[in-house]
Amino acid sequence: MMQLTQVLQQFTARYRNALLTKAALLTGLGAAIVALLSWRLRAMHAPSLWAVGAPVALGLMGAGALAAWIARHWLSSRETAAHLDRTLGLQQRLMTAAEVGARPELPALYEALLEDTARRLDPEQGHVPRPMDRTAGLLAVAVLILLLWWPDGSRLPFPIMPKPQMTKPTPPPVNPPPPPSQPPAQQPDQSKSPSQGGTAQQPSSGGQQPSSEGQNQPSSSGDNASSKSSAAQSQNGRSQDGQKQGQPGSGTSQAASQGHQNPEQGSSSSHAGSAQRQSGSHDQQQGAGTSSQPSSGAQRPSSQQAGARPAGQQAGSSAQPQPTGRPASPNNMSSKSGGQPQPGSTQSPSQQPAGTPQARNAASSSSSPGTGSLPQPGQGAGQSSSGNQEELKADIEQLLKEVSGELKELQGQLAASQDQAHPTAGTSTNPQLYEAPMKLDQQTPGAGQMPLQLQTDTAQTRNQRTVGGTGTPSRQAAAGSPQLQPQSVQLSDAPQDETPASRQPIPPEYRSAFEKLQQQSQPQPAR
Amino acid sequence: MGALPLKPDAFRETFVMFQKELGRLIVGQDEVVENLLAAFFAGGHVLLEGVPGLGKTLLAKSVAQALGLSFNRIQCTPDLMPADILGTQLVVDRDGRKVFEFVKGPVFTHILLADEINRATPKTQSALLEAMGEHQVTVAGTTFRLEEPFFVIATQNPIEMEGTYPLPEAQLDRFLLKIFVGYPSVADLGRILQQTTVAEIASIQPVLPLDRAPGWIQSARRLVREVLVATPIEEYVVHLVTATRPSDGGSGDSAGRFLRYGASPRGAQAILMAAKVFALVSGRVNVSYEDVDRVILPALTHRVILSFEAEAEKRTAADILTELTRPIRSAVTSRA
């Protein structure tokens, strides 16, 4: 009896533990889902009624469902015995023993029942369900995955409105070929700059490679921001976006260096800027308050200038970037907004004039149509993420306006062309239907030539053309052609307007009848 | 806690010995033999139904021989009177005085075979009611107890209905089980030919000593009643029986359409008693759902009365009962 009671108690405890474990896991999963929903609604700027009410309602529903589930699966002692009978194939031995054992007077066969049950229960005890069964394990894995995937701060685990798709449709301007005067030392640096993002903040990197000094700083800022963003995004599962943001470091440095070397192509570098605009603006948001801020903006022109200098000058400037770059962060902010450097910045004099054209180049490239503002990688390093989001939102709205304007214009043209009624061919009486013929100027040299001169028009032919063409006929052709003599004309008194009937073709078999009718309809001349 | 009249294992072993002994002569009817023995140890009576020539009478005689009990046979005919079964008062000369003396009829035996019981008139059939139900006979105001164990085996032919009198419901209800005797298989038929067409025909030997047999059987019947039944099992039986009632309406349209009357409480008793025997035979001292399922049809098929619609659609009681009890059984199986 004691053994049977212990078995029942043990099984009941284990079953209830398993049930409670599942319930706890379900509660955790439900709470995570509710929190995720609340967070998403808040990130989407949903109304407060929805942002609060929907998660609360969902949580209440989940709690009710969980309570119902527990109540349904909660086993009493009798149900425990029945469940164990079914699980272990005891054919209601435990159920009967548990019930009969509770009676005040035990029947004669009770001892035999206990003995039989205990004998069959011993080898079967291994089949008692574990507290952590398969379903509970799956739930635990789900909760763990959700917790690992949980985003940090205010970053979205996946974009609500994917920014690359919003900016990609804007056609970038035609990229002119690179100037032939570009120094060859820039090429390896451009290809190297993305990979140098992680080491760009080290001063030794600039000194070791003077030619890449001009790119180290922008790429360091860009890569720094992008590396931060990609690090954060890799946590959020945005590896693709992180790869896209890894590009801007090189793009920024390339654009900056090109803009410095050839100021006339300041806007032409927007093709790289367009690629970096997505990430650059993104980096402005993401690089907030980081130490990589000094390397952006005003510092970049000086470093780019150093990169454009001969090697002897680059060595001197390469030692400066880090100390001079750090105070330049306010200047970067202003250059981003206004495109002009701050004269009161703590930049060195040698860097200040170099930074100005760069900032102007950046401003000019940002004002180029269809490209938006050229973001400076890591330029918005000191801004808060909320402000960056608003900035990004404004940028996106601007792009949307541009795109929508073009689209509206195209739609208007299409509607105008569709709404225009096409007259029947040959029935239009509009004198302005065609433009006036273009008169060839006889006085100007080369006026006899066709607007588009073909070689066949001037080639020698065996037979002279008597007539044809739109040019002046040859003398022979002019002589052989009939000459029109001026004649005196007089307007006819008869009406020239055609009656509709006259335009009707009359079949031959009806012609006689029609003539009779016409004669009858005409008034008889007075005799 | 009282003393056990018999060890459960001893009962099971003896039961198996009965089966083997009967199986030597009754070929291919193992289930019939098992049900018949179960009804016997449950304290009930059985009604064997089958076409002629299937060994129903032989089975009844063999059971009596195997059990070592007294055996009487009544060949029921339309002119059979109740006194021919129960006995009658005869005027006898006792010391010069004419007195009435009761002469016991064939009912006073341990095992009574009422062969082709449906050929007897209802009056004669009703003569067995008291004997089957109360194990006593009342003649001319005098009640006579029947010797225990008393066991009635009745047979009837389902195809020869002319000149027959279907058993009244009260009579049918007193049979614990109604056992259908079917055709043997081809292999079993070959064995039957080999055993019955040779010079030496096998005979049934008593399993128990003749002097101890009645006492042992009584102990076995008490043991059967000691078998434990849990409350869910009893509820299951109650649900099964009440599902056959047309007025309940809880079992769907089948009961209302095809049944005029459902099973009586005696049907539930029959189910549980037979299930207890099968529990002991299975080596348990408690009744399980499987034991109940095993005896549903033998215990209820003769306790329900089919409606005209069921007869018109040629539905059998077994089909209807299977249809009625299926949802209850599936619900219990999924729950327990």
Image (spheres, grey):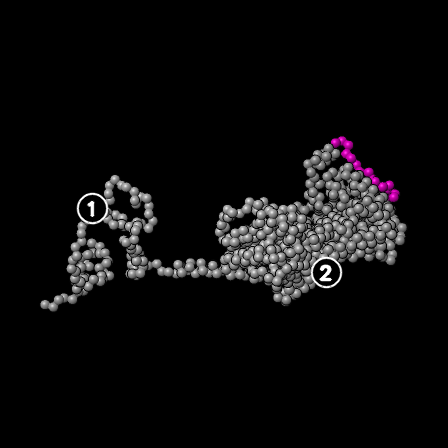
Q: Which mark is residue A67?
A: 2
Question: Dot 1: few (<14), some (14–19), or many (≥20) neighbours within 10 Å?
Answer: few
Of labels 2 and 1, earlier in sequence is: 2
Of all residues shown, which one is farthest toward the bottom?
A526
User: Residue at the left extreme?
Assistant: A527
Residue at point 80%, 54% (across, down): A13
Quadrant hosting residue B170:
bottom right
Looking at the image, residue B202 sits to the left or right of residue A256; the answer is right
Callout 2: helix, strand or loop?
A: helix
Q: Which residue is mark 1?
A: A476
Q: Which residues are magenta?
A: B197-214
Q: Residue at x 59, y 62 (%)?
A: A343
**So how many labels did they put on this image?**
2
Secondary structure mostly seen in the magenta stretch: loop
Where is B52 relative to A203, above or below? above
Question: Which numbered tag is attached to residue B148?
Answer: none
Disc 2 or disc 1, which is closer to the eye?
1
Residue A53, position as x, y percentages in the image: 65, 65
